[in-house]
């Protein structure tokens, strides 16, 4: 039997020893070496040839990943690693670094307990490094640090020991500042990364060597040895003395928590059920004999088996052949296969127990973010909150009408496998709108439809998704909305929510949808912690995205009977605002008064919904509606002699340059650019810099469309949607 088969056999035995399991992700900025490192860890554990490590990119098994040289999917691999004679099972997830695929990083963090943050020794921490650290800490995932590409510091930049230490220190301080800013208060100090405590390692993923203080202590190697091997171009010998998989997997086993420890503090953060119930206790204890709680974090298509659902088992055991519910689905479905993952390969096993990451087939209703359990009334996990929202849309339809049923199915599968995509259908025209994080995200999604599902499609030019907001209020001057029968009237005031409240809403701190009466007090208290009026916020009816609905009426008898209809009207406006039917953001809607017909038959849905909807839209127009456009933070580095062309490209795209630090003959331009102006940017920046620029982008929220462009942009959106071109006024909502 070969080493791989031996390891698979050991893995299937160790997977039931919860104290010997480590679930970890590798996360970093794009091109900092995550997939190369993953290869070396898998090879070191005997799951692939060591000669191919770093070149075969076993976790980039998607052909688009291979063609573009970037990671698009979060891919997982299970492997065995021995520490002091004991076998440990490492479930590793390699995550994407490109900003367009940040949703995959967020979902992967739900499945793991520890995270290796990679930072390039030459480039240091970059915008996406900050984002992935924040994503890990939000999910209570403990980080350790690996400083990669150290060989480049020695061989290319020719720096000496003291200078290298200075660079390391700068990276460590930056990562610790992020941990201090975003870690839960009780772990801010304990989770700081520290060279002396063995939570920082450094090395070269490409040349397959690594080093840490504990490893130096075990082997007697030191920095002098590293310099000598690098100067003598003998990194192969160094990789034999200090293999990177040994250093990092030792660090993962010794310094990162297993599921038995992590679930004690992670479950209260990601599950809102009663912790004293049987299910709650089973998850806290990671009990393999308790009720099944499995959270799906990834769906991918296997050409033979169809949809494969990959997720973390927090309690219970999933077995082949049993019937399970994907919560929200109408009926139970049978598990056809249970497996462990190694990249694109699945290793079939009869069952997988609590604390592991498993792959199952047969649960067709499963989607990323869905909870799978044995009973239909189980409490689901908290929804996974993504840090950025879809900001670019394309209209897409099949070229051949005969492909329409297949196309609708394929789009549904696409939305299930990637929760960062939003798919909406127009059933009359057969056209679908696909909204994603950026041009590349949509390009890859369309490629999957055409190549994997074999459907030829027509795709429109990319469209930017704007948001509608207000920059005033109509306090003391409520807008009246009348029902079609004129028997019911609703009076609405609106005001802008503070930025910190909008951010907390975006991160899901208050929940979403209708707020049950018994929860309103608790939710109101959470808003009060942000400086808002406690008594007012306790009258909350609903939350829609980053918007809030408050019932501020007094003594109106029938108002609670129309509560659901009022909430429905509010949620409708959250999706389609008054200006251009774009989603609204950051608006507090207050129902301050109402006159209702005493007979319920005269205040049904056909009367109440249009009246409340018009009142909210009219109130927003009265409070001076504004259009918000998505922005991207931009960082472009290039030689000084091509800087003129680069700054010209940014300023002609309405970009704002915030800083231009110079390091030798390289200048970095840091600024912000509207997403609407970024289409085709890659080609233009290559031409302007003769291909010598490197750049990266990061989502930077929304900013108001400049007043001189407001009318033009609004009219363009309205015309595209088949609405009248004129910008609406209060008069549009008075009837």
Image (spheres, rainbow, N blue to C red):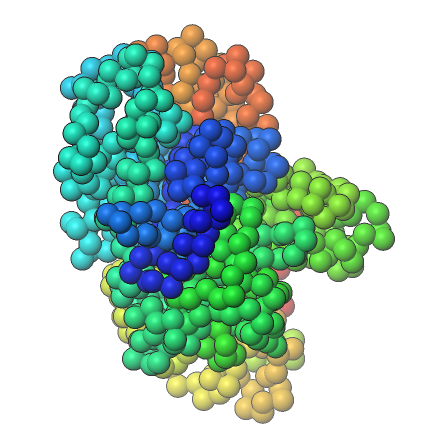
Asked if residue 648 is positioned above or below residue 629 in the image, the reply reads above
**Which residue is found at the position 66% from the left and 56% from the top?**
306
Badge count: 0
Q: Quadrant of residue 604?
A: bottom right
**Which residue is found at the position 51% from the left and 86% from the top?**
561
* Nearer the observer, 385 or 482: 385
* Nearer the observer, 373 or 355: 355
Asked whether residue 9 appears in the rendered view, the answer is: yes
**Which residue is found at the position 74% from the left and 53% from the top?**
407
Q: Position of residue 501 (x, y in %)?
A: 34, 57
Asked if residue 570 is positioned above or below residue 330 in the image, the reply reads above
Q: Is residue 47 left or right of residue 265?
A: right
**Which residue is found at the position 39% from the left and 86% from the top?**
555
* Nearer the observer, 335 or 234: 234
Which residue lies most toward the top here? 641
Q: Is residue 723 left or right of residue 699?
A: right
Asked whether residue 611 appears in the rendered view, the answer is: no
Q: Position of residue 298 (x, y in %)?
A: 52, 54
Task: Pick the quarter of the image with the C terminus.
Answer: bottom right
Q: Position of residue 522 (x, y in %)?
A: 30, 74
Q: Position of residue 474 (x, y in %)?
A: 42, 61
Which residue lies most toward the front here? 1
Asked if residue 653 is positioned above or below residue 550 in the image, the reply reads above
* Nearer the observer, 243 or 140: 243
């Amino acid at each position: 039997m070969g080493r791989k088969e031996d390891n698979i056999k050991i893995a299937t035995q160790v997977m039931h020893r919860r104290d010997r399991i480590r679930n970890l992700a590798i996360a970093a900025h794009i091109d900092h070496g995550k997939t190369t490192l993953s290869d070396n860890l898998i090879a070191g554990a005997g799951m692939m040839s060591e000669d191919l490590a770093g070149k075969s990119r076993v976790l980039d098994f998607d052909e688009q990943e291979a063609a573009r040289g970037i990671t698009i999917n979060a891919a997982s691999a299970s492997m065995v690693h021995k520490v002091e004679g004991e076998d440990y099972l490492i479930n590793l997830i390699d995550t994407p670094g490109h900003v367009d695929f940040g949703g995959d990083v967020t979902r992967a963090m739900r499945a793991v307990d520890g995270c290796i943050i990679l930072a390039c020794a030459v480039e240091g921490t970059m915008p996406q490094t900050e984002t992935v650290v924040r994503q890990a800490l939000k999910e209570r995932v403990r980080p350790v640090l690996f400083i990669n590409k150290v060989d480049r510091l020695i061989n290319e930049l020719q720096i000496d020991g003291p200078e290298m230490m200075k660079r390391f220190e700068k990276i460590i301080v930056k990562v610790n500042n992020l941990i201090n800013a975003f870690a839960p208060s009780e772990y801010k100090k304990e989770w700081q990364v520290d060279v002396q405590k063995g939570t920082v390692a450094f090395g070269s993923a490409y040349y397959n060597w690594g080093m840490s203080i504990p490893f130096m202590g075990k082997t007697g190697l030191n920095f002098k040895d590293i310099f000598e091997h690098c100067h003598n171009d003998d990194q192969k010998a160094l990789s034999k003395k200090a293999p990177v998989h040994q250093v990092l997997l030792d660090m993962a086993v010794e310094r990162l928590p297993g599921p038995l420890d992590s679930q004690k503090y992670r479950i209260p953060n990601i599950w809102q059920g009663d912790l004293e119930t049987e299910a709650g206790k089973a998850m806290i204890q990671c009990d393999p004999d308790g009720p099944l709680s499995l959270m799906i974090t990834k769906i991918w298509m296997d050409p033979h088996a169809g949809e494969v659902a990959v997720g973390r088992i927090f309690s219970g055991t999933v077995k082949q052949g049993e019937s399970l519910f994907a919560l929200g689905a109408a009926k139970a479905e049978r598990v056809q296969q249970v497996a462990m993952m190694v990249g694109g390969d699945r290793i079939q096993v009869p069952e997988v127990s609590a604390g592991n990451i498993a792959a199952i087939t047969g649960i067709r209703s499963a989607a990323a973010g869905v909870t799978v359990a044995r009973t239909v009334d189980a409490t689901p996990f908290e929804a996974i909150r993504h840090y950025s929202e879809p900001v670019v849309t394309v209209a897409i339809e099949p070229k051949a009408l005969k492909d329409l049923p297949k196309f609708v199915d394929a789009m549904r599968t696409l939305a299930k496998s990637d929760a960062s995509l939003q798919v909406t259908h127009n059933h009359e025209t057969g056209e679908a709108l696909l909204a994603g994080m950026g041009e590349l995200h949509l390009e890859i999604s369309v490629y999957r439809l055409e190549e994997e599902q074999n459907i030829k499609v027509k795709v429109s030019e990319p469209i930017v998704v704007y948001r509608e907001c207000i920059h005033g209020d109509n306090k003391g001057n409520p807008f009246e909305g009348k029902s079609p029968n004129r028997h019911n009237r609703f009076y609405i005031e609106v005001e802008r929510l503070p930025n910190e409240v909008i951010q907390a809403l975006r991160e899901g701190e208050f929940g979403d949808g209708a707020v049950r009466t018994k929860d309103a007090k608790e939710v109101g208290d959470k808003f009060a912690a942000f400086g808002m009026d406690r008594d007012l916020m306790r009258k909350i009816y609903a939350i829609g995205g980053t918007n809030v609905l408050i019932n501020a009426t007094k003594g109106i008898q029938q108002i609670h009977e129309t509560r659901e209809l009022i909430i429905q009207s509010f949620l409708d406006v959250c999706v389609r605002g008054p200006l251009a039917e774009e989603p609204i953001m950051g608006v507090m809607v207050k129902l301050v008064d109402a006159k209702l017909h005493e007979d319920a038959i005269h205040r049904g849905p056909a009367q109440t919904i249009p009246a409340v909807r018009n009142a909210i839209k009219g109130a927003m127009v009265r409070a001076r509606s504004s259009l918000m456009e998505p922005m991207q933070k931009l960082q472009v580095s290039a030689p000084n002699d091509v800087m003129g062309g680069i700054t010209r490209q940014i300023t002609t795209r309405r970009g704002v340059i915030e800083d231009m630090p110079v390091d030798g003959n390289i200048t970095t331009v840091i600024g912000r650019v509207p997403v609407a102006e970024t289409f085709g940017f890659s080609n233009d920046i290559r031409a302007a810099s003769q291909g010598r620029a490197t750049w990266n982008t990061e989502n930077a929220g929304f900013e108001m469309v400049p007043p001189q462009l407001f009318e033009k942009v609004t009219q363009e959106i309205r015309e595209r949607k088949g609405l009248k071109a004129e910008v609406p006024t209060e008069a549009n909502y008075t009837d």
